[in-house]
């Protein structure tokens, strides 16, 4: 099974310091949905691993989160794509759970649910904690220079990145990378 694990806010959609709290606030980044569709068409299963501490902080409820994901799926379907599953941590940082990135709990849940080892599974996100969580679970880390990492487009890099992290301008460039290196593989 070809599996890829993506962060959501700042990777697929615009992020906000005030949290993305409603379907109206959920806006895809340019080219992100098309990138997911291209991965789907090449046989990739795309899964999201996302911290959603706005739930634990009482900023929005599960119905609002589900509505955001319904909007995302509808917009993806319009371009021929889909997300196979969304795994999220609803806890605030103070709750000290194992599923909040940078800890690997969400990734372990994904591996268990899909019945696959995560060693070498590509994961892309816009923050160090996204990649630390994935790397701790054995995933191959990819930093997209959108969202929290857009500031590094002109150079430099955040501290604490896992060894071997690959850099991509955005999700479309990440998808291009995976599709080019897997040409001819099934």
Image (cartoon, rainbow, N blue to C red):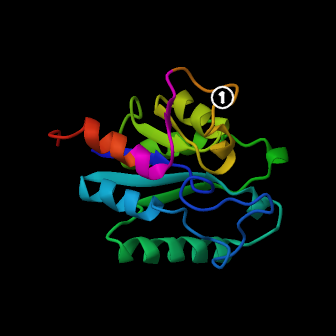
Visible residue check, residue 31: yes
* Residue 55, percent from left and from top: 75, 63
Along the line of sight, the residue nearer the viewer: 54 or 174: 174
Along the line of sight, the residue nearer the viewer: 51 or 179: 179
- Mark 1 = which residue? 156
- Identify which residue is drawn at 65% across, 79% down: 24
* Residue 66, percent from left and from top: 59, 73
- Identify which residue is drawn at 59% across, 70% down: 27
- Identify which residue is drawn at 85% across, 45% down: 94
Quarter-of-image position of residue 182: top left
- Identify which residue is drawn at 73% across, 43% down: 97
Q: Which residues are magenta?
A: 164-174
Tally of marks: 1
Visible residue check, residue 112: no
Along the line of sight, the residue nearer the viewer: 112 or 126: 126
Q: Quadrant of the C terminus?
A: top left
Q: Quadrant of the N terminus?
A: top left
Along the line of sight, the residue nearer the viewer: 110 or 81: 81
Disc 1 residue crowd, few under 14, some 14–19, many 20+, Cα 10 Å: few
Quarter-of-image position of residue 33: bottom left
Q: Is residue 179 left or right of residue 175?
A: left
52 vs 117: above or below: below
90 vs 109: above or below: below
> Which structural element holds mark 1?
loop
Q: Residue furthest left?
A: 184
């Amino acid at each position: 099974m070809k599996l890829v694990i993506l962060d959501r806010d700042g990777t697929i959609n615009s992020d906000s310091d005030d949290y993305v709290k409603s379907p109206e606030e959920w806006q895809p980044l340019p080219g992100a949905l098309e990138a997911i569709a291209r991965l789907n068409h090449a046989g990739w299963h795309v899964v999201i691993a996302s911290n959603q501490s706005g739930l634990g902080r009482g900023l929005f409820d599960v119905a609002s989160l589900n509505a955001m994901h319904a909007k995302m799926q509808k917009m993806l379907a319009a371009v021929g794509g889909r997300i196979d599953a969304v795994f999220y941590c609803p806890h605030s940082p103070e709750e000290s759970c194992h599923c909040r990135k940078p800890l690997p709990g969400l990734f372990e849940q994904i591996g268990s649910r899909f019945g696959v080892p995560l060693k070498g599974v590509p994961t892309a996100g816009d923050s160090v904690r996204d990649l630390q969580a994935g790397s701790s679970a054995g995933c191959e880390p990819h930093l997209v220079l959108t969202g929290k990492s857009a500031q590094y487009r002109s150079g430099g890099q955040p501290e604490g990145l896992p060894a071997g992290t690959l850099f991509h301008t955005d999700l479309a460039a990440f998808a291009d990378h995976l599709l080019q290196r897997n040409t001819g593989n099934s």
